[in-house]
Amino acid sequence: MRRSTDSVSSIEMSIRLAIDGGINFMLRLDVSMLADSGIPEHVLNDDEWQGGLVLRFDVGDHSDHCITFNGDVMAVSLSFDTLYSCRVPLRAILNIVMAFDPPPESPIPASGLKLV
């Protein structure tokens, strides 16, 4: 699948938004575009990922992934059976899913009133 430059820029902006905003997110990647990505072959060849390799990025781990962008490539540290330095073409990203956690419940104010 060919993506326009605007589409690639939107993908990068969406990922930056998730990281900067402290948002959990997942990426679904086109496995056929990941041969030179640094993702291990045993992961890419797993039948489970024929519909797209799913990577989950939890907010507590964002800094561990060391995500940077260079042109149309995302450099990222990923852990499978060990830690891998990977280069994912932004054009390989099929979907971005962001998971917004609900805000924590605030305690009832001392007056006994609760804003609804």
Image (spheres, rainbow, N blue to C red):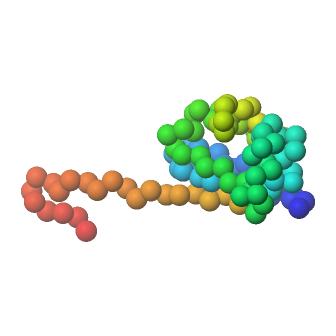
Q: How many marks?
A: 0
Q: Nearer the viewer, residue 91 or 12?
A: 91
Please tell me which residue is depicted at 89% across the width and 61% down the height of the picture.
1
Q: Looking at this rendering, what residue extends furthest in the right direction? A: 2
Task: State whether residue 65 is above or below residue 48.
Answer: above
Q: Quadrant of residue 61?
A: top right
Q: Is residue 65 visible?
A: yes
Q: Is residue 59 left or right of residue 71?
A: left
Q: Is residue 50 left or right of residue 82?
A: right
Query: Which residue is painted at 44% across and 56% down in the image?
Result: 101
| Residue drawn at x 59%, y 52% as measured from the top left | 25
Which of 17 and 34 lies nearest the eye of the viewer?
34
Q: Is residue 28 above or below residue 35?
A: below
Q: Nearer the viewer, residue 57 or 17?
A: 57
State the image coordinates of residue 104 (x, y, percent, origin top left): 33, 53
Residue 14, percent from left and from top: 66, 53
> Where is residue 112, by image quadrant?
bottom left
Q: Which residue occupies the extreme bottom position in the image?
A: 116
Q: Position of residue 108 (x, y in %)?
A: 17, 56
* Quadrant holding the C terminus: bottom left
Is 25 above or below relative to 71? Answer: below
Task: Determine the residue positioned at 63% across, 54% down.
Answer: 26
Whether residue 94 is visible here, answered yes or no, is no
Looking at the picture, tell me which residue is in the foreground, 103 or 38.
38
Compared with 86, 8 (above or below) is: below
Q: Position of residue 6 (x, y in %)?
A: 82, 56
